[in-house]
Amino acid sequence: MQLLKERIKHEGIIKTDDVLKVDSFLNHQVDTALIDAIGAEFARLFSGRPINKVLTIEASGIAIAYAAARHLNVPIVFAKKAQSINLEGDVYTTRVESFTHRRIFDVIISKKYVSGDDHVLIIDDFLANGCALNGLIEMTEEAGATIEGIGIVIEKGFQQGGRTLRERGYRLESLAIIESMDPATGQIVYRS
Amino acid sequence: MQLLKERIKHEGIIKTDDVLKVDSFLNHQVDTALIDAIGAEFARLFSGRPINKVLTIEASGIAIAYAAARHLNVPIVFAKKAQSINLEGDVYTTRVESFTHRRIFDVIISKKYVSGDDHVLIIDDFLANGCALNGLIEMTEEAGATIEGIGIVIEKGFQQGGRTLRERGYRLESLAIIESMDPATGQIVYRS
């Protein structure tokens, strides 16, 4: 997605070999028009699939999942990172190690909202080592739901998450795949 | 907002005198069409104000803030609940006690994304005692930004948050104000 790649080039800040900041438009401040275009692109890419629900994980995935779901005309479900007193009852649970936060979260989804009848599109902002996605996949498959696809805004192609998921046979669409990035020069090379 | 009030009556679960679950459409599973209508309603209610940014707090506020911001054609900024390695640098911070989670969070906003030039609409899903909102207000005012209004989806009118904010002079618009709710009968009385 050209619009996104240009935005990353202009505003992304390469902190280290594997940390890219895009908090001016994607995951702290959120450019509503760009996210709407991203949602439309995911809806176009997965238009042939019988998706009835978009699944993501709080917090950075929510706006993107909502935008895709609005274009697909389906609800979203966002997995929660900590048990709340309002989410008691039967839940799917998994543990996710966040690359960005360098810590482990418990993640839950209420069994009421993902079931064997569901055809799910999983959405997230970043794909690095794939820990968060693997947690969502594990809970979705435990529910017996069908994963129709996985949509990622920015994939770090030099980490193993994307390759592993494609090898496992998932249809994974990343709108920008970064092959390499250099904190010294600020240069980003995309996979073509 | 009649559509919302009916949805709460049909799907809301009153757990105790002061805990209402609406996770089938608002803050776990998210009804995209309803949230879009809620966003349009906030845009209509605050249409006379020179809003250039919608501010919320992760996670449940994000989809609602995004929907309002899309109708207002402005970006959103969501305050984050924990320091991430990707959010170093100058930040506004506050501490918020969550009514739902029964614990205290550190909340941060990067100084890059809220400044004295901004005219902010603050959005959240619930207003109970007002702790989360007070944290957002404190950081916004510390930034020197103007608070043009506060939009809430569900206000628990029997807790003191809404009254206190109105007495302090903020323009607060809640789409559904619950005067009382009864866990025994399931009955909800709205403020008219």
Image (cartoon, coloured by chain):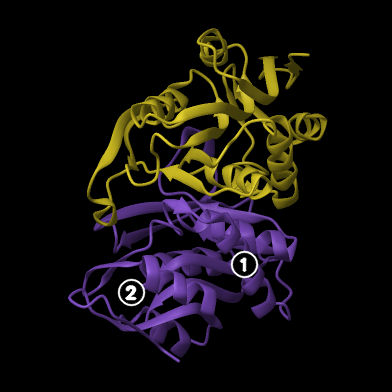
Chain colours: A purple, B yellow
Residue ID at (63%, 59%)? A67
Which picture quadrant has residue B136? top left
Provide the secondary structure element on which disc 1 rests. Answer: helix
Q: Amino acid at mark 2?
A: Asn
Residue type at mark 1 is Ala
Choose mark 1 or mark 2, whichever is in front: 1
Residue found farthest to the left: A184
Residue A142: x percent and y percent?
Answer: 53, 66
Q: Which residue is mark 1?
A: A37
Whole-percent x and y of residue B37? 75, 43
Q: Residues within 10 Å of mark 1 (few under 14, many from 20)?
A: some
Image side of residue A38 versus residue A104, left or right: right
Of all residues, the one furthest to the top in this rendering is B167
Q: Is residue A145 left or right of residue B80?
A: right
The quarter of the rendered structure image containing the C terminus of chain A is: bottom left
Q: State the image coordinates of residue B35 (x, y, percent, origin top left).
A: 69, 45
The residue at the point 62 percent across, 67 percent down is A37
Q: Is residue A32 above or below residue B55?
A: below
> Would you say residue A128 is visible in this rendering?
yes
Q: Chain of mark 2?
A: A
> Which quadrant of the rendered structure holds the N terminus of chain A?
bottom right
Q: Residue at x 68, y 20 (%)?
A: B177
- Given residues A111 and A130, the one toward you in this image is A130
Residue that carries the numbered disc 2 in the rendered image: A129
Q: Residue at x 36, y 68 (%)?
A: A131
